[in-house]
Amino acid sequence: MTEFESDEDFRNLTPEIQAMMGVFALYWKLNEQFDLINTNPQLTKLESRMVLRLDQPRRMGVMAKLMMTVPSAVTAAADSLEARGFLNRTRDPEDRRAWLVQLTEAGWEHRRQMEQLAGQIFAASSGLTGDETKAFSELAGKIFDNIMRTGAPEGLKTCE
Amino acid sequence: MTEFESDEDFRNLTPEIQAMMGVFALYWKLNEQFDLINTNPQLTKLESRMVLRLDQPRRMGVMAKLMMTVPSAVTAAADSLEARGFLNRTRDPEDRRAWLVQLTEAGWEHRRQMEQLAGQIFAASSGLTGDETKAFSELAGKIFDNIMRTGAPEGLKTCE
DNA sequence: ATTGAATGTTTCAAAATCAGAAGCAATTGA
DNA sequence: TCAATTGCTTCTGATTTTGAAACATTCAAT
């Protein structure tokens, strides 16, 4: 038992708040770990997540939605990754207003490394067993889908 | 089905990355929702989390550890909450270098409201059923404990 | 008691991040 | 061909976060 009084500490909190605390903690831990492995090509958190998200070519606007951020932030991240030679932009032939962004070979190489490390990072950060990880990722997948479906500031109307 | 191609979209990703994506998405969604309900006393995200964490008096340093941030950030948050009359500081009798921070009655009242809303926010954001929420929060609790136990930039040494 | 090192917190200023408004280019529909 | 819309970018100001130095208290060793 460390300096941190872990167990009785959590008991006062409702399940939902426990879940939130866990999510907050894991969020920071994952970001921290990604920062550690990204010392070589020094990527920001957003850029790292963008690389992970580029398992296929995507439009800038779709990226913004997936990453839950503003288009201008995606522009900045893409600029930086493009300057490093990790991705390139081409006009979307279906709608030439839109940019289609995709990884270069160097980008793929980096993504493969990240993907491989991601498993280890998650395991180390979460401390879950294989089965627990599987259960957790299924629930996380549901949550992700729900958030993408319900979108931005909606969804709390039921609380008024 | 909305504009977002949710299902086949997720299948390319490993379970761990799926889990991460879910965590990232939930993190933002929760923050966003907390911002929405905190329009009245305009609290920052950190201040909101601090209120939730103050189910009992705690030292500043412990707060920093629990909230995974730097002591100076906790100082700022506590200053703001103190100015609003939500908490007060007293010297810790066990070690008079340390401040013991705790909610005032007004702080408790606000915390009760937040706690009540948190359940609704989590349900709306996650879209999980009651059972799923319970399972998720148990796993999240384990993760939180693990992160507190393993601490900051350790834990990835196994990857080198 | 007194000194020096360590610890808990605060202050302050620099740095990173983020959001939003305005602008540009391509598309759509009349 | 014109106005309205959409997708992205630029730019700027605001908010957040971070880190180094400072300050007060404690602790350990004399």
Image: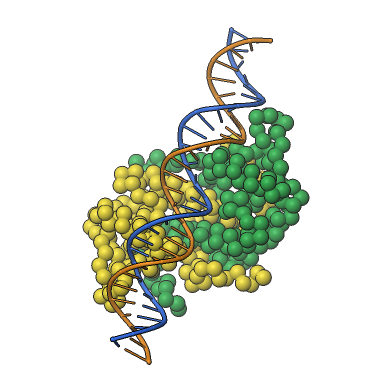
Chain colours: A yellow, B green, C orange, D blue
Residue at the image point whose x is 24% and y is 55% from the top:
A85
Could you tell whether A4 is left or right of B21 in the image?
right
- From the top left corner, tell me how far across and down residue B158 is, in percent: 39, 41
Residue at the image point whose x is 65% and y is 38% from the top:
B59
- From the top left corner, tell me how far across and down residue B65 is, in percent: 57, 41
Question: Front-most of D3 and B7?
Answer: D3
Q: Quadrant of the C terminus of chain B?
A: top left
Residue at the image point whose x is 49% and y is 49% from the top:
A28
Task: Please tell me whether residue B105 is drawn above or below residue B136 in the rendered image.
Answer: above
Q: Is residue A100 visible?
A: yes
Task: Please tell me whether residue A8 is drawn above or below residue A56 in the rendered image.
Answer: above
Q: How many marks?
A: 0
Question: Front-most of A89 and D5?
Answer: D5
Question: Front-most of A18 and B46?
Answer: B46
Q: Residue furthest right?
A: B105
Question: Front-most of B104 and A36?
Answer: B104
Task: Please tell me whether residue B53 is drawn above or below residue B17 in the rendered image.
Answer: above
Could you tell whether C13 is left or right of D10 in the image?
right
Q: Is residue A107 visible?
A: no
Task: Please tell me whether residue A160 is drawn above or below residue B37 in the rendered image.
Answer: below
Q: Quadrant of the N terminus of chain B?
A: bottom left
- From the top left corner, tell me how far across and down residue A14 is, in percent: 66, 56
- From the top left corner, tell me how far across and down residue A50 is, in percent: 36, 58
Residue at the image point whose x is 56% and y is 66% from the top:
B125
Could you tell whether A70 is left or right of B106 in the image?
left
